[in-house]
Image (cartoon, rainbow, N blue to C red):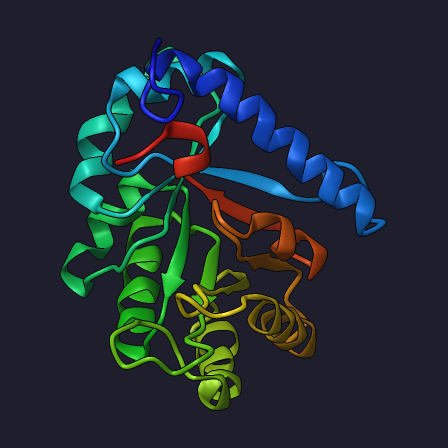
């Protein structure tokens, strides 16, 4: 009997289950149906896992690395129109131009140097991607992201001074801690700064994220299985 976690033929079924759980969480939170976007995190997975999700109608995906996205997605985009790929991993300034060509959304804008590099590259290329500001809510030293106290200044730099298309905030709560307070804080910060989108919640906690106002959840393992 196939292992339900690693069997590639189960991708479509697991995707259906995740969609149903998001819909149930929307109803429980008295939110409109379809108000939460599912970003299927396909990092490290090959076509054997990704194609079943595409065939099941999934079109929004998340990748961590520029080079991996450059390699994987051009042929898949040709086969499946309408694909949108989010960068959800750290972005080096020397990869900005490549990222603008490979991705459709940048979720990890986290420092002034990167903001300036993105502004320059967007200006010269004419390709302006929606950006999320990554917030390090617990100020963990090993994680990227702007500290909450520095967020007002960073928003002013990115949105007002550099005129970047900032659409929302993104976070990864501390591991092994209850995520709800962090989700509530990110949603509060987004409202305070007039940002409509909030990207938070992964396989283990996306239903909680929906409860606290996520507009996008990033789900990998629950759809594609173990890495």
> As drawn, is 203 to the left or to the right of 95?
right
Q: Quadrant of the N terminus?
A: top left
> As drawn, is 119 to the left or to the right of 155?
left
Of residue 62 and residue 211, the one placed in the foreground of this image is: 211
Q: How many marks?
A: 0
Percent position (x, y) of residue 216? Answer: 57, 48
> As drawn, is 33 to the left or to the right of 163?
right
Percent position (x, y) of residue 169? Answer: 53, 65
Q: Quadrant of the C terminus?
A: top left
Q: Residue at x 69, y 72 (%)?
A: 191
Q: Residue at x 34, y 19 (%)?
A: 3
> Measured along the vertical axis of the image, is residue 220 above or below residue 113?
above
In this view, the residue farthest toward the front is 1
Corner quadrant of residue 187: bottom right
Corner quadrant of residue 122: bottom left
Tell me if I can see residue 77 in this picture: no
Corner quadrant of residue 123: bottom left
Percent position (x, y) of residue 218? Answer: 47, 46
> Measured along the vertical axis of the image, is residue 24 above or below residue 73?
below
Tell me if I can see residue 95 in this picture: yes
In this view, the residue farthest toward the right is 30
Of residue 91 and residue 142, the one placed in the foreground of this image is: 142
Q: Residue at x 57, y 32 (%)?
A: 18
In this view, the residue farthest toward the bottom is 149
Percent position (x, y) of residue 201? Answer: 53, 54
> Measured along the vertical axis of the image, is residue 3 above or below residue 167?
above
């Amino acid at each position: 009997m196939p292992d339900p976690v690693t069997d590639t033929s189960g991708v479509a079924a697991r995707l259906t289950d995740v969609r149903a759980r998001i819909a149930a969480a929307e109803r429980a939170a008295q939110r409109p149906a379809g108000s939460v976007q599912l970003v299927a995190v396909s990092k490290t997975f090959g076509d054997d896992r990704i194609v079943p999700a595409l065939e099941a109608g999934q079109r929004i995906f998340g990748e961590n690395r520029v080079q991996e996205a450059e390699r994987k997605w051009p042929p898949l985009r040709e086969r499946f129109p309408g694909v949108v790929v989010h960068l959800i991993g750290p972005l080096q300034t020397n990869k900005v131009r490549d990222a603008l060509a490979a991705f459709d959304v940048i979720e990890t804008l986290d420092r002034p140097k990167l903001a300036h590099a993105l502004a320059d590259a967007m200006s010269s290329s004419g390709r302006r991607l929606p950006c999320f500001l990554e917030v390090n809510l617990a100020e963990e030293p090993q994680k990227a992201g702007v500290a909450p106290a520095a967020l007002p200044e960073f928003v002013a730099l990115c949105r007002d001074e550099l005129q970047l298309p900032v659409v929302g905030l993104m976070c990864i709560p501390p591991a092994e801690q209850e995520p709800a307070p962090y989700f509530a804080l990110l949603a509060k910060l987004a409202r305070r700064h007039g940002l409509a989108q909030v990207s938070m919640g992964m396989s283990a906690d996306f239903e909680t994220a929906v409860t606290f106002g996520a507009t996008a959840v990033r789900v990998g393992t629950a759809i594609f299985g173990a890495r």
